[in-house]
Structures are given as C-alpha cells and as structure tokens.
Amino acid sequence: MNSKAYEEAVLKGITRAKTEMKQHKKPMKWKKTMSIAASVGIVGIIGLSQPEVAKALQEMTQSFNAFSAHLFGEPTGRFQEVAKMIGVSEVDEETTITLDEVVLDDNLLMMALTVESDFLAGYEKLNENDFFNLDYYLFVNGKKTMANSPKVRQIDEKTGAIIIEASMGDLHLPDEVTIDLRISQLTRGFESLKGKWNFKFKASKLLGGECLNPDATIEYERTMISANQVVKSQLANTIYMSVEGESADDVFYELGDLVIKGSNEELYDVDDVQGSFDSEKKEATFKLRVNSNWSDLEWIEIYPRTTEPYRYIVKDKIHYQIYQTPNTQVIDDEYQAITRKPTDQELASGFALDEVIYYLNLQKSTEFKILTEFIGEEIWVNSTEKVMIEDIELMEDEVKIIFRLPDTYWPHNLSSLVLFDEELNDYARREGQS
C-alpha cells in the first residue's frame, strides 16, 4: 500500500466522475529524435557505505493488500475499504467545499476534498498545484497539527480536487480520534476569497500499527548516527534518528537525499523530513516519513545517493545547466547554445525570460532515432551512471518514458530530461507536470 497511489487514485477518480474522457484520439507523428540528459547530481557529504540501520522488521498481523507498491494508475475502487467516506459539504461565499474521504493510521492522515467556486475561473497556467490553495487550521484530538504541502488537481474551469496530508507519528493516537479542519480562505497567487468552511468529525485509525526499537548506531567522521525507533503502519512509516558529533551539520542537511532500500529490493523516497539542529552542541534529532506499506519487509537499509558536481554556466547572473548527449560518459566543458522565443503556453505558465536557452555538449556522432527505438537502451546520466529506458508510451498530448534506475540515482533528476529532434526543436517536461 502506498499513500502516493491513494492520492493519485482519489484525484483521478474524482476527475473521472466529473469529466468525460476523450473518445477519439489522433495518432501522433514523430520526427527522429534524440534525448539529452542534464548531468545533474546532488552534492553529497555523508559517506555511510550502505549500513543497515534496522533489521528484522516484524510482519504485522494484518496486511492490507489493496494498496500496490506502484505510484500511479491504480483504480480508485482498491482504496475504498480503507478510506472512510465522509461526503459532507460546507457552503459559504457561493463556494462549496466537500470533504470526500479520509484515511488515518498511526503515521499519516490524508483527506480528499473538492472545491467548486467561481473564484477558480480563468486559470490558464499549466501547473495544477497553482490552481488554488486553502488556508486552514487542522486539529487532531484538540492538538494543532502541521500539514504538508497539498496536492491539487484541476477538474474543470471552476472545480478542483485537493489532498491534504499530515504526519501523525508523534501523536500516539488512540483507536478513534476527533479531527477538526477549519478552512478560512481560498487563495491563488495574491488573490483570496475569505469564508468559513469547517469540518469536525470522528475517524477510526487503521489497525495494525507497530513500534520497533532497532537501537542501531554507526560512526562517521567522529559523528554517531543512530536509528532509535521505527513506527510502522499501513499507510506510512516514520523513522526517528539522532546525530551527535563533529559532522552532525553535514549529516543533518543531507537527510532529504537518503535512499531507503527494503528487503524486497524496492527503493523508497523520503516523503517528509522534520527535525532540529543545535549548532553549538553539534546535535540533531529528526524523523523521516516514508509513505509505503512495509508489512512484508524483513529489513531496511539507509544510505546516501551517489552524487556528482552540478555542471552549469552563468550568463547574466543566471545559472544554466549544461546538457549532455547520453551516448558517452565523457564529460567536458564544451557546449553550444540553442535559443528560441518562449511559446504562449510557456508564458502563460509563468516563464519569465525573453528566451528559452539550452547549453548542449552535443556529440557529433549522436544518432537521431525514432523515439521508440530508444526502448531497451541504456543512456548515461552522469560520468558514472546509466539508466535503462524500459518503455516509451506515445499519447495524444504527451510522452511517458519509463526508466529503470541504479539504486542510488535520484529519480527527480530525470525531470531535466529534454528531447531534441533533428532541427533541434526541444520537447521538455513542463512545470507542474508529474
């Protein structure tokens, strides 16, 4: 079970319920294309050399098989048995906010809401997360709780869906809790609509949570790194760690770049990092939340991602990545500039420069191919690592490229991938796309 899958399925399910699918799609025509990957890495400092910090994670007595380990594409129906259907609407300022579903366990609270309002009309940008936002207070059993950045989807011109999630690991929840969500305004950019949309209800948490105390400690450059506790539950897992010593600040500020690998050989992203650092005492305490079901894991490993210096040039005080053709691992500083005017769509999405500029380290021997001919090939993403292109799906308005990655490669780097055709026209992931 993966809460990201729940988010995506709920949002897609709400969207499907309120819009009609396109029935007649035109086939895509493609020129020969090549891919260029930016040589981008996250500079790392932690040299942990893949230590195990928790072993022998016991299986829960209750496993919830409805959730898949995949992030996207799961039907909404698979999640109905764990989501509590609320279906309560509040209306103010001619705006209707509906609390559709709630899921709660020992680590995570997730709420799916829809918003219908004339205030939402007129949005022309591409990033759905900017369609709207909500200002609210969230209380769980009377305690004010901080929520993470919400996920937003645009359903139609005046309707959107939003997922709100909050970490529960520190609250030690009873089996039934009271949730109080007080929404005070809708916002978009500098505009806002004030109102009052309050929801107060009781929710039962999913059973099967477990608290483990691995008491695992390693030493790194006169610094002790300890995994003190793991709280497992069906939606998510929270790892409580502490750092003490000379390099505590280095370790603390690299937490978001850690890899967590399970005994099933799957990799897990850290979805939320919270903590504090005392620079005088050289001490840090923090917690990592991973939104996945670990009920079948026997152990986990935590280690840093491989890193490489960020390659860029500076023009007019702006940093530009140097893009590298992926048929060689040889990295040098030669490049050529490819420029064009931004499209109306890019300008509408907030692109602020007069030109779109790519700096390319273009290999003369690069062979342009029909895009699907890249399937099954490995391409270099930096001077030490390659990724495998497992599949390419051509759709009416977009291309989906599926990769197989090395254990320590940071998948978010692939958002920098750009396709160029033989005339060096560029096709890139737009801001706001998943």
Image (cartoon, rainbow, N blue to C red):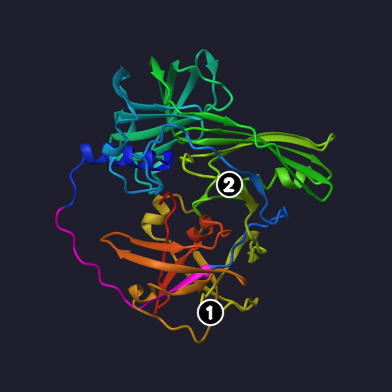
In the rendered structure, the answer to whether residue 254 lies left or right of residue 27 reads right
Q: Residue at x 84, y 34 (%)?
A: 281
Up the image or down, 308 lies above or below 233; here it is: below
Residue 122 visible here: no
| Residue 300 badge | 2
Q: Residue furthest left?
A: 24
Closer to the N terminus: mark 2 or mark 1? 2
- Between marks 2 and 1 in the image, the one whose residue lies nearer the viewer: 2
Amino acid type, residue under disc 1 in the picture: Leu
Crowd rating for badge 1 (residues with CA inside 10 Å; few <14, some 14–19, many 20+): some
Q: Residue flagged by tag 2: what amino acid is it? A: Ile
Residue 310 in picture, x, y percent from top left: 65, 63
Choose between 188 and 172: the one closer to the eye: 172
Res. 117 image quadrant: top left
In the rendered view, would you say 327 is above or below 106?
Answer: below
Q: Residue at x 57, y 46 (%)?
A: 299
Is 393 part of what is drawn in magenta? no
Q: Position of residue 379 (x, y in %)?
A: 49, 73
**Which secondary structure dominates the residues rendered in magenta?**
loop
Instruction: Name the spot of residue 428 as percent of width and height, x first.
Output: 43, 63
In this view, the residue in front, 274 or 131, is 274
Q: Which mark is residue 362?
A: 1
Q: In the image, residue 190 lies at what x, y percent?
A: 47, 33
**Magenta segment boundaries in residue numbering:** 23-37
| Residue ID at (39%, 49%) | 70
Along the line of sight, the residue nearer the viewer: 398 or 400: 400
Q: Mark 1: which secondary structure?
A: loop
Residue 35 belongs to the span the image colors magenta: yes
